[in-house]
């Protein structure tokens, strides 16, 4: 496997944010560069998950529009209630 290539990128941040990053870096005994890379990495991972969740919702809506299959809120609540009570319950069947 090849090593990931890193390339410099410049961002502009206000002085207050710069100072806050530096205070965190000092407290963590890290560099401000490390703090910013970590913050960006966590943000990107979180937003990728959020976007995947959004895309799943869009796909589910499109599938419902095509076939009309669904479960009612009451059916879903009853199933979730069984799971919450510790019962091993199968999800309700989708219907039109």
Image (cartoon, rainbow, N blue to C red):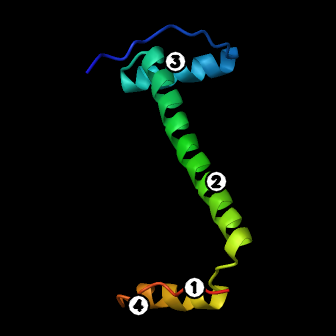
Q: Residue at x 71, y 69 (%)?
A: 66
Q: Residue at x 36, y 91 (%)?
A: 87
Sequence-first disc among 4 and 3: 3
Sequence-first disc among 4 and 1: 1
Q: Which quadrant of the structure image shows residue 75? A: bottom right
Q: Could you give the CA–CA distance between mark 2 and mark 1, rounded to whole angstroms?
A: 20 Å
Rendered-image quadrant of the N terminus: top left
Please name the residue that numbered disc 4 is placed on.
Answer: 85
- Against 29, residue 87 (above or below) is below
How many numbered tags mark residues here? 4
Within-10-Å neighbours for mark 3: few <14, some 14–19, many 20+:
some
Marks 1 and 2: in contact by CB < 8 Å?
Answer: no
Q: Could you give the CA–CA distance between mark 2 and mark 3, rounded to whole angstroms?
A: 35 Å
Callout in the foreground (2, 3) = 2
Point out the residue furthest to the front here.
66
Please name the residue that numbered disc 1 is placed on.
Answer: 76
Of 5 and 82, the residue lying toward us: 5
Please name the residue that numbered disc 3 is placed on.
Answer: 22
Within-10-Å neighbours for mark 2: few <14, some 14–19, many 20+:
few
Please name the residue that numbered disc 2 is placed on.
Answer: 54
Q: Is residue 12 left or right of residue 53?
A: right
Q: Give percent across and percent down for residue 38.
A: 45, 28
Q: Secondary structure at mark 2?
A: helix
Q: Give percent across and percent down for residue 53.
A: 58, 54
């Amino acid at each position: 496997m090849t090593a990931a290539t890193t390339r410099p990128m410049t961002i502009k941040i206000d002085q207050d944010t710069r100072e806050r990053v530096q205070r965190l870096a000092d407290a963590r005994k890290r560099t401000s560069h490390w703090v910013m890379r970590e913050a960006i990495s966590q943000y990107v991972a979180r937003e990728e998950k959020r976007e995947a969740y959004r895309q799943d919702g869009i796909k589910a809506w499109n599938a419902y529009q095509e076939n009309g299959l669904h479960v009612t809120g009451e059916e879903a609540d009853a199933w979730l209630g069984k799971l919450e009570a510790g019962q091993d319950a199968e999800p309700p069947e989708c219907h039109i």
